[in-house]
Image (cartoon, rainbow, N blue to C red):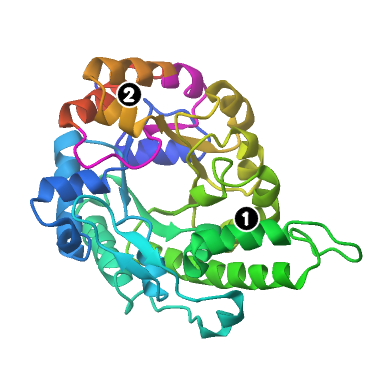
Amino acid sequence: MAERMTSLERVHTVLRGGVPDRVPVDLHNFMMTAQASGLPFPEYYQNGEAMAEGQIRAWREFGHDVLLLENGTAALAEACGCQVEYMENSAPVCHGPAIKSLDDLDKLEVPDPYKAHPLKENLKATRIVAREIGDKAFIIGRADQGPFSLAAMLLGMEEFLFRLGQADQPRAGRRRSGGGDSELAAKLHRLLEFSLAVTTRYAFAQMEQGAHMTSIGESLSGPDVCSPKSYRAFEWSYAKQMVETLQAKNVMLAYHICGDATAIVPDMVETGAAVLELDYKVDLKRVKEITRSRTTVLGPIDPSGVLALGTPELVDEKCKEAIEILAPGGGLILGPGCALPPATPPENVHALVEAAKKYGVYN
């Protein structure tokens, strides 16, 4: 059956709470595109032209509706002074903090995304892709990590989580909302406020390149790492602030937390984010109950066990299951729940796209 909508019409319909002709498809494929480029990964991830070319080539091959542009989880961290290692066969990783302790907060400066490396290359990639195919596909310019995850990298993950645990203990006397009344909690909130400013500035820069939406990753704040109590005390209000700041300028935000985020999905919805990027570990039926008519779910196919290591038949089966639960009434963009590994077989990606066309058609 011929499709009645373009990719842009399809995605915008879902985001407005409507029912499109079929379920749209997203690919979280920045590592696949690096592999396919033939370039060394460290070179690819620091070259805006190469990243753009890789994404456009993948779109021409797979025909997906949504392109999610990024170079991993360490771009903002590097721009803020963290040590970052460019891996030979994977995405860059944060390898050392920008500050030694919370007493060094005044040493941090908000980077200019148009000048700081590698943000300027990521922006270049978004600008090229938006210029070349932004009238045909929906472009999400990832604003890298959200305030919580960026703060963890700036201080060092172990140190940040340790201090978080210390600060998340109520004390007698007046409590500061979301973290007790201790001096330590106040310092952590200062770090989070700095990180919010960094992420928000970069998000706006992504939109200035022609992206249709921006996105943040906050998996470090999810239940696989932190308790829901810590999430609500030290993450939720910052995500909500970012959503509201962007909404004031008519900018939509996608909010990514992988792992089993079921316990905090109601809180994620309350941030007002236009899209929740969720993975296969969540309770799909519960997620549908919570998100129906309130936001859009992006995901939730297992990127490793199904898409990278499975067969096209398994991909088809898991996509059918997800569509049956999450698609009724709209509110679903089908895709991997997190980043696809570099060596994901192209035939499995084709199976993902075809599954949406086979099972995701609305009458």
Q: Which residue is mark 2?
A: 356
Q: Position of residue 181 (x, y in %)?
A: 81, 67
State whether residue 42 is above or below residue 296.
below
> Residue at 37% across / 35% down in the picture?
10
- Going by the picture, which residue comes out furthest to the right? 173
Q: Position of residue 67 (x, y in %)?
A: 30, 46
The answer to whether residue 248 shows anywhere in this view is: no
Q: Image check: 235 left or right of 9?
A: right
Q: From the viewer's perspective, is 40 left or right of 69?
A: left
Q: To which quarter of the image does residue 262 belong?
A: top right
Q: What residue is rendered at 53% in x and 68% in y? A: 195
* Gap in angstroms between the C-alphas marked 2 and 1: 33 Å
Residue at the image point whose x is 71% and y is 47% from the top: 229
Q: Is residue 207 magenta?
A: no
Q: What are the residue bounds of the magenta stretch?
A: 322-344
Picture coordinates of residue 52 (x, y %)? 19, 56
Residue type beneath disc 2? Ala
Nearest the eye: 313 or 241: 313
In the image, is residue 342 part of the stretch drawn in magenta? yes
- Under circle 1, the secondary element is loop
Q: Amino acid at mark 1?
A: Glu
Residue 235 image label: 1
Q: Earlier in the sequence, mark 2 or mark 1?
A: 1
Q: How many marks?
A: 2
Q: Furthest residue to the bottom?
A: 107
From the image, state whether disc 2 or disc 1 is nearer to you: 1
